[in-house]
Image: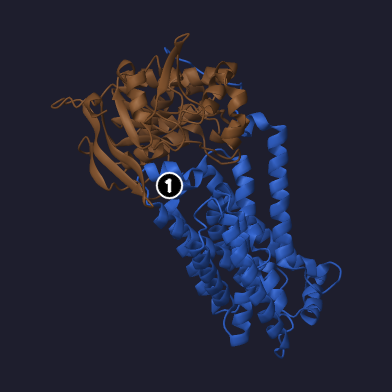
Chain colours: A brown, B blue
Amino acid sequence: MSDLIAAQPGNTGEVLSLDGVTVWLSGRTVLDDVSFSLHQGQLAGLIGSNGAGKTTILRVILGLQSVASGLVNIRPGFRPGKPGGIGYVPQKVVIGKDVPLRARDLVGLGLDGARAGFPFPSRAKRLAADQMLEAVGMTGFANARVGSLSGGELQRVLIAHSLVSKPSLLLLDEPLANLDIASEQDVVALLSRLCREQEIAVLVTAHDVNPLLSVMDRVIYVARGNVASGTTGEVIRQDVLSALYGHHVDVLRVHNRILVVAEAGLEPQSGDTERQFGAQGDSGAPGEAGSTGPDANG
Amino acid sequence: MAEHMLIPGLLALASPYPALSATPLGSSPVQTALLVGGAVAVASAMVGLFTVVRGQSFAGHALGDVGTAGGSVSYLFGLDVLVGFVGIALITAALMDLFGIDREEGRDVATGGVLGSMLGVGALLLYLDSTLPGSSGSAMVILFGSLFSIPGAAVPFAIMLSLLVAGGVGLLFRPLLLDSVNSDLARASGIRRRVVGRMYLLLLALGIALSSLTIGAILSTALLVGPAAAAAVLFRRPLHAFLAAVAVSVLSVWAGIFLSYYSYYWPPYGHGWPVSFFVVAIIFATYLGARGYCQTLGRRTGSIPGPLPTLDRGPL
């Protein structure tokens, strides 16, 4: 896979690069020699099933996970939360209905949340927050409680919160999980637009490659702690993904969608495809029901 | 005028309190109660807003309940009751921290486990207290508080602690708010969560100890989270909710003190009703009122401002 990594030495627009990163967690190799890079204005999908190592990669980039070996290069001056640092939208943010916090306040905390003292209102802060809310199309919700927002609306406010400090890199952990299809497409289009407008690099984790297909400049496919990165055409191929998974997988293109399927019992599991594509992946189901045990209940 | 002269005379016969005068403001125990109660009300409401946002009321309640053990120790050794409340709250907070109160999963187990064992100790100590000569009222004071009998020496201590808590909350406000809303967002903002979490737990322990002094160990959670919960329902901005919580808290305590003072004129005559009853009743009524107000006028103060906004999809 290493020959697929776009090294592009000397490119000044490089925002992030991981070079041979290996991570051990309680004696287990979670990431094994992971390398990829990301440039300004690029939207990349970090694709893989649960437990493949996506979140660990994000934690490494955020500096929350130490590496056993390898290098993480983030454009100099990057510090989480500081202007020009990393914007981060975590997975599954739940905010109570009665929390006294408006969308505008949450975005404002993206500017000064780490500083001591009271959040006294200021014209500059309000302006910056409102500008960012406008950029994510949430102007009408500036005064709404964050706890009252729908999943898609909250996702937009969180994006505004993480972009208001003007970072060069935006990380989103499963932003499309728990969204209905309309909101999913909204968020994807928004990210694609912000990526260009704000001149940032965007890294989005997802378990399904399809919602991101039309907007991804690069895909970083994660399986078993290894990655393959490049354009979708370079990576989502039968030979590349078979090598990544360590066993034969088929890449099917159906109605502009991509299905990555393997034999029963092997990753990517038939359960995933059933959930995503309904009856299509069901052809061999009766035979495998007994052997795959709890996984076959979908 | 004649009535005015008569009533204090009767009260002087019936009341256990020294120097109870015709107007509450002229009485030294009432002045002390207003001063200490006001300071404590400010401090606990400030901490309480974050307790509400963090959803850690149970931890607050546990810290209050274990105060029974601390208060009892104070009586056994002849110390000021606030010393016991503060000491036990700090020890319990440290234990909770050790057992993982900071993790969302297992938080209630950590709290419940510590609470259960400490309450057992509290039961023993309260019993031992009751065997001391002349300590018949100690259990009542520990469990339900007694603002009118705060010893003069405890006043500067209580006020100093209140100022400390208020200052700490003021200093921590923004990082603590972001951490309380979502810990992942706080972490990504470069906030040192362990430091903020421990500082908050320390402030919570002190706040609940102060609250216990005012309305007793058992009821202390009400003063901690009640005003903040009502304020959070009414106000959408963090700073507004914060100020409202402080106002509700102080007014409830002061109103409780005055009502308790005047309750000497109520049956059973000559025995005032406890301050803590009035304080808790007022806070609860305020909370119910706030909820009711928002339900009927939800559009003004509730979640959605004015007409329902539409999602601006922009030039996607």
Identify the residue at horizontal 64%, vertical 79% (top origin).
Answer: B72
User: Disc 1 marks which amino acid?
Assistant: Arg
Identify the residue at horizontal 32%, vertical 42% (top origin).
Answer: A60
Q: Is residue B98 above or below residue B285?
A: below
Q: Is residue A148 above or below residue B177?
A: above
Which image quarter holds the C terminus of chain B? top left
Which of the 4 image quarters holds residue B152? bottom right
**Residue to which mark 1 is pinned:** B174
Q: Position of residue A23 (x, y in %)?
A: 32, 45
Which of the 4 image quarters holds residue A120? top left
Chain identifier of the residue bearing label 1 in the image: B
Residue B20 in view of the camera: no
Tally of marks = 1
Report crowding for label 1: few under 14, some 14 to 19, many 20 or more residues within 10 A (C-alpha).
Answer: many
Q: Is residue B175 above or below residue A135?
A: below
Q: Position of residue A156 (x, y in %)?
A: 46, 26
Which residue occupies the foreground of this view, B298 or A206? Answer: A206
Which residue occupies the foreground of this view, B18 or A149? Answer: A149
Identify the residue at horizontal 66%, vertical 58% (top origin).
Answer: B222
Which image quarter holds the N terminus of chain B? bottom right
Which residue occupies the foreground of this view, A94 or A103? Answer: A94
Q: Is residue B165 left or right of residue A69?
A: right
